[in-house]
Amino acid sequence: MEAIKETVTNVIQRLKTKKSSAGGNKTEDLLKKILTKKELQHIKVNYFKGGILCLSVDSSVWLYNFNLKKEHLITALNKELGSIKDIRFYIGETK
């Protein structure tokens, strides 16, 4: 029985490591450094897969605003992560 417990624990630890190395929490932390507090209230990280970062925004106004900053965001995030090819913004839930 101990072998199963150890195996499950190891799998969970690997999944946590993969999430943070793939850009999950690290991406959110970097966005907190790059964006203002007001901007952070209107955006949420959905997923990061295949070099594409998908972010939800809460209105068309903020969608336009973030699209204007898209190149700056890609450049700033690539300084730390080095793996972002594109950022896609969608109107959706941000909480």
Image (tube, rainbow, N blue to C red):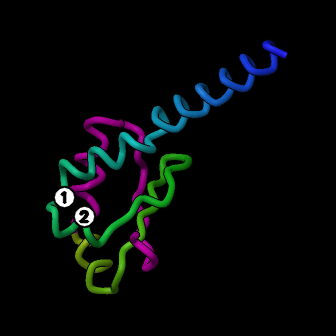
Residue 61 in the image: above or below residue 71? below
| Part of the protein shown in magenta | 69-95
The numbered mark at residue 65 is: none
Q: Is residue 60 left or right of residue 10?
A: left
State if disc 2 and disc 1 touch (CB < 8 Å): yes
Tell me what residue is drawn at x 40 percent, y 46 percent: 84
Tell me what residue is drawn at x 85 percent, y 16 percent: 1
User: What residue sits right under mark 2 in the picture?
Assistant: 40
Q: Residue 81 or 32: which is nearer the viewer?
A: 32
| Quadrant including the C terminus | bottom left
Q: Residues within 10 Å of mark 1 (few under 14, many from 20)?
A: some
Task: Based on the picture, tell me whether residue 86 belongs to the magenta stretch.
Answer: yes
Residue 89 in the image: above or below residue 9? below
Give SS at disc 2.
Answer: helix
Residue 6 in the image: above or below residue 83? above
Q: Is residue 82 left or right of residue 1?
A: left
Q: Earlier in the sequence, mark 1 or mark 2?
A: 1
Q: Is residue 4 left or right of residue 84?
A: right
Position in image of residue 34 (x %, y %): 18, 52
Q: Which amino acid, by three-letter code, is at mark 1?
A: Leu
Task: Based on the picture, tell me whether residue 79 belongs to the magenta stretch.
Answer: yes
Give SS at disc 1.
Answer: loop
Q: Is residue 6 left or right of residue 23?
A: right
